[in-house]
Every structure is written in C-alpha cells, then in structure tokens.
Image: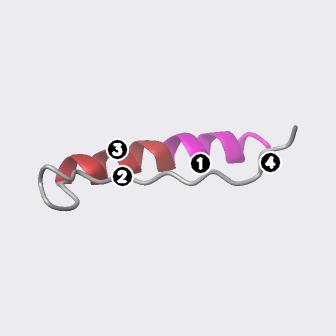
Amino acid sequence: MDYKKVTLRLTSWHAGGLTAADFDEAAKVDGIYGALTASKG
C-alpha cells in the first residue's frame, strides 16, 4: 500500500463555519507534516 495524498477537512458546523480552533488545528497538522517531510530530506 502506498498513500501519497491525504485530505483533511476542518469545519465547525455548530459555529456556522470555520473558527479560530479550526485554524489552530490546521496549524498543528501543518507542523506535523512539515516535521515529517523535513526528515525525509
């Protein structure tokens, strides 16, 4: 198996759209992705 693409959608439907918490979570995911791809050099 080889996974090259992952799609992650963040939304807070209770709030009627994106919230600051969604952006915070997206930043965490970006940080994890950056750390993983940087180590592959």
The amino acid on which the numbered mark 3 sits, given as a three-letter code, is Glu
Q: Mark 1 or 3, which is nearer the eye?
A: 3
Residue positioned most to the bottom: 17
Tell me what residue is drawn at x 70 percent, y 54 percent.
5
Give the quarter of the image for residue 15.
Answer: bottom left
Frontmost of labels 1 and 4 is: 1
For residue 12, the mark is none
User: What residue is disc 1 on?
Assistant: 34
User: Disc 2 marks which residue?
Assistant: 10
Lower position in the chain sequence, tag 3 or tag 4: 3
Which residues lie in the magenta part? Answer: 31-41
Looking at the image, which residue is at 22% across and 51% down?
A: 12
Q: Report whether 41 appears left or right of 5.
A: right
Contact, mark 2 vs mark 3 (Cβ under 8 Å): yes
**Residue 41, disc:** 4
Looking at the rendered structure, which numbered label has been put on residue 25? Answer: 3
Q: Earlier in the sequence, mark 1 or mark 2?
A: 2
Structural distance between the alpha carbons of marks 2 and 3 = 8 Å
Place of residue 9 in the rendered image (x, y in percent of width and height, measured from the top left): 43, 54
Residue 26 horizontal/vertical position (percent): 39, 50
In the image, what residue type sits under mark 1?
Gly
Front-most of 38 and 14? 14
Of the image marks 1 and 4, the number of the one nearer the N terminus: 1
Label 1 CA crowd tier, 10 Å (few <14, some 14–19, many 20+): few
In magenta stretch: residue 36: yes
Of discs 2 and 4, which sits in the foreground? 2
**Residue type beneath disc 4:** Gly
User: Magenta segment: does it hold 35?
Assistant: yes
The amino acid marked with disc number 2 is Leu
Which callout, 3 or 4, points to the residue nearer the camera? 3
**Cα distance in 3D space between marks 1 and 2:** 19 Å
Q: Is residue 2 found left or right of 16 in the rendered image? A: right
